[in-house]
Amino acid sequence: MDKDTTPPYLSLFAALSYGIASMAMVFINKAVVMEYAFSMTLLTLQQMATALLIHFGRIMGWTRAKPLNVETAKKLILVSLFYNGNVAFALASLKGVNIPMYIAIKRLTPLAVLIAGLFYKKGKHSKQVILSVSLTAAGVMIAALGDFSFDLFGYIMALISVFFQTMYLVLVERSGAEDGLSSIEIMFYNSLLSLPFLAFLIIVTGEFPSSISLLYAKSASLYFLVMFVLSLVMGIILNYTMFLCTIVNSALTTTIVGVLKGVGSTTLGFFLLGGVQVHFLNVSGLVINTLGGLWYSLAKYQDKLRKTTLPR
């Protein structure tokens, strides 16, 4: 689908769906990980469930996804590599960086996507878009000053994760635009290509076979079983809405939605988790960050309205 001709309501729906799914996934995964610490195995099972669902959906005629194509898979190897690199380095960074600082560093992704876009796009972003993203990044930095605990290794891992996420989103956007792939097709290839890499990781990190034994033991708990299945389902929904938002809107829009999701998750975390000390700089930074995201959303929505009403 051409971004310029996509109805504004569909663009808004895609962005809101991704934001809600992403926020819900944070708390669902948190509930699962509290009882099942093997996060890489959880991710592997989520990707496996996604690939199988799409495969059987195509066979049953529930989706119009095209059959597996080797040439297309080769083109999307980098997408899968950057996706899994982002996840791996993000998990590594969490070992030394606290959650508020991790979220703050990851919120630098929109600025990185904006800079990357200057190298592969023919057109340039409007002043409103540039200023709004800059305001978002400034809010991140101010918020970080209020909760600063320096860990060099953790910071490096988080920044590398930002780079991988940036390249991943940019490649997804280009794959949808240039290769004519739907969000479901990109999601299928990404899940399928991720499996060998993730299988290697769970063996190297020592998660397997202990993770399978614990999963079998925990399956006796109805609460855990429900949350685990819900995590698998939400993993599929999250990936779909992310790809849809990136293709229908842009990589930059997806990262901004991610930023706003982070603000919402952090705010809910203050009330749901407790034990978090609030600082003036934290609150000020989050407010500036949110204003920048809202400004960007308004600017992009106005651009969408202008493009869809232009005569062709």
Image (cartoon, rainbow, N blue to C red):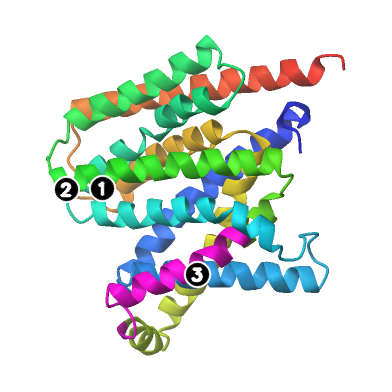
* 44 vs 36, nearest the viewer: 44
The residue indicated by pointer 3 is 195
Which of 154 and 215 lies nearest the eye of the viewer? Answer: 154
Q: Is residue 14 in sight in this rendering?
A: no
- Secondary structure category for the residue under label 2: helix
Secondary structure character of the magenta stretch overall: helix
Alpha carbon separation for disc pair 1 and 3:
22 Å
Q: Residues within 10 Å of mark 1 (few under 14, many from 20)?
A: many
Amino acid type, mark 2: Phe
Disc marking residue 76: none
- What residue do we see at 14% from left, 43% from top? 152
- On the image, which quarter does residue 201 sit in? bottom left
Q: Are marks 3 and 2 in contact (CB under 8 Å)?
A: no
Please indicate whether residue 82 sits to the left or right of residue 247 in the image. Answer: left
Instruction: Look at the numbered disc 3 and give the secondary structure of its residue.
Output: helix
Chain part drawn in magenta? 189-210
Residue 153 is labelled as 2
Cα separation between marks 2 and 1: 6 Å
